Amino acid sequence: MKDKKVIWITGASSGIGRALAIKFANEGWIVAASARRENLLKELNQENENIHSFPLDVTNTDQCKDIFNSIIQKLEGVEISIFCTGIHDPQSEKKFNLEKIKQIMEVNYFGTMNSINAVYEYFTKKKSGQISIVSSVAGYRGLPAAGAYCASKSALTSFAESFNFEMKRSNVRVSLVSPGFIKTPMTDKNDFPMPMIKSPEFAAEQIYLGLTKKNSFEIHFPKAFTYFLKFLKILPNFIYFKFVEKGMKKIDY
């Protein structure tokens, strides 16, 4: 495996993670694909022999370490780790639901922390490579019926910014991925209009270019949508709230 570069992708069984696994494999990379649904990982392996299945529940701290060690042993190294695992349930978030909030934070935030914990020592000793964290534009500001999801993504965004300072000292690149609406099984649950929604393949192409051809901290897309949301970030709260509430009335949400 030493003649080919290796990437570890979590959340690889569907959505952005799956499209990303296929993109990197088609570009000649060796892909260590992790997710809970082992049957879907096997389908990926059957689709492209460059994709290797490493089933994983990211909420299990010890299992994250064990799986990453298995990847290192089998594939003889990793150049990039990108953590795509995420869940969202907009219907349950329309009312305060403590158990659902805990579940979303456990997977989206702490699942990513478990994954970073697994690779941290490897990359700091290696003094090279990349750790990429998939957040969302939902982390920019709070949105209706998405309190826990927005909070989990906002936490990831802030962590990535802080983590970047630390890992620079070890010559390890940290990147933050902030997609807009991407058509996935997760966004299929949304019952509101999703402007400028893109395919997982579009997302995979943007991320691939950002990780391999460019060197910016944040990889965000589609640009027209993300720059508009970045503008909303700087608005005073009273203007932002009125703007969002007006939009909610238009769609009777």
Image (tube, helix red, strand yellow):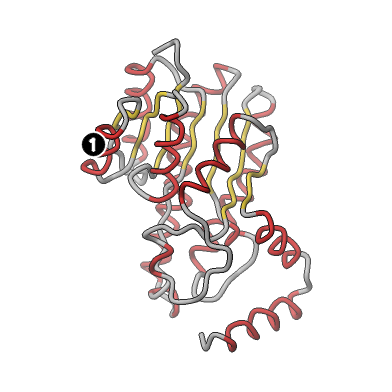
Is the residue 86 above or below the residue 249 in the image?
above
Q: Amino acid at mark 1?
A: Lys
Is the residue 210 above or below the residue 76 in the image?
below
Q: Nearer the viewer, residue 184 or 100?
A: 184
Specify the farthest residue to the top. 3
Is the residue 113 above or below the residue 252 in the image?
above
Q: Residues within 10 Å of mark 1 (few under 14, many from 20)?
A: some
- Residue lying at 42% horizontally and 60% vertically, measured from the top left: 104
Specify the farthest residue to the left. 39
Task: From the top left corner, tell me how far across and down residue 127 is, in percent.
Answer: 60, 18
Is the residue 25 above or below the residue 223 in the image?
above
Q: Is residue 240 left or right of residue 163?
A: right
- Residue lying at 57% horizontally and 58% vertically, measured from the top left: 180
- Describe the element under mark 1 as helix, strand or loop: helix
Specify the quadrant that holds the N terminus. Answer: top left
Q: Nearer the viewer, residue 115 or 30?
A: 30
Task: From the top left corner, tell me how far across and down residue 112 is, in percent.
Answer: 46, 44
Task: From the top left corner, tell me how far across and down residue 21 is, in percent.
Answer: 41, 36
Task: From the top left corner, tell me how far across and down residue 34 is, in percent.
Answer: 34, 37
Q: Is residue 163 left or right of residue 120?
A: right
Q: How many marks?
A: 1
- Residue lying at 54% horizontally and 42% vertically, measured from the top left: 133
Q: Is residue 131 left or right of residue 9?
A: right
Q: Quadrant of residue 140?
A: bottom right
- Residue lying at 78% horizontally and 65% vertically, measured from the top left: 234
Q: Is residue 100 left or right of residue 5?
A: left
Residue indicated by mark 1: 42
Q: Quadrant of residue 169?
A: top right
